[in-house]
Amino acid sequence: MDHYRNPRNRYTLEEPDFAGEQENAYCADKVHFAGKLCAATKTISELAFSGQGCVLSQAIASMISEQFILKPIEQVFMGNDENFVCALAGSPLGPTRLKCALLGLKALQQAIATYKERNA
């Protein structure tokens, strides 16, 4: 609840190096991630999110923003996405809640994948 009431890194980032958005049409949750990269190391130097939706989608987006700042962009694609967000949530999630929890991670992955395609 703390990440929902007091989200970390929730702001609009001006001139990001990468940006992506995901929306859950079923419940209208939306998460947008934007970030800046250190060009030399390909690490995320700044990461911000915005959006609207349920407690879970917004709190997990806040946690994700803390998890990946100052990390190499490749770490965003490592491991099992479902296990990762369940660990952040602190409990297993059913299929409907899992879609909400994955929204932020999918937005960040989309943003980085698009960046990598543009800069290949």
Image (cartoon, rainbow, N blue to C red):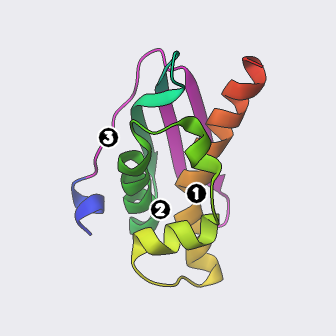
Left or right for 48, reference 113: left
Q: Residue at x 51, y 16 (%)?
A: 40
Q: Is residue 109 left or right of residue 4?
A: right
Which amino acid is tagged 2?
A: Ser
Q: Nearer the viewer, residue 78 or 113?
A: 78
| Residue under the image location 51 percent in, 67 percent down | 85
Residue under label 1, please give it: 103
Identify residue for label 3: 9
Q: Quadrant of residue 26?
A: bottom right
Residue at 39%, 39% in the rendered image: 69
Question: Is there a contact, CB below 8 Å, between mark 3 and mark 2?
Answer: no
- Distance between mark 3 and mark 1 Cα atoms: 16 Å
For label 2, the residue is: 57
Residue 73 in picture, x, y percent from top left: 57, 37
Circles 2 and 1: CB distance less than 8 Å? yes
Indicate yes or no whether the magenta region holds residue 48: no
State which quarter of the image contains the C terminus. top right
- Looking at the rendered structure, the kind of residue marked 1 is Leu
| Magenta region | 7-35
**Dot 2: element:** helix
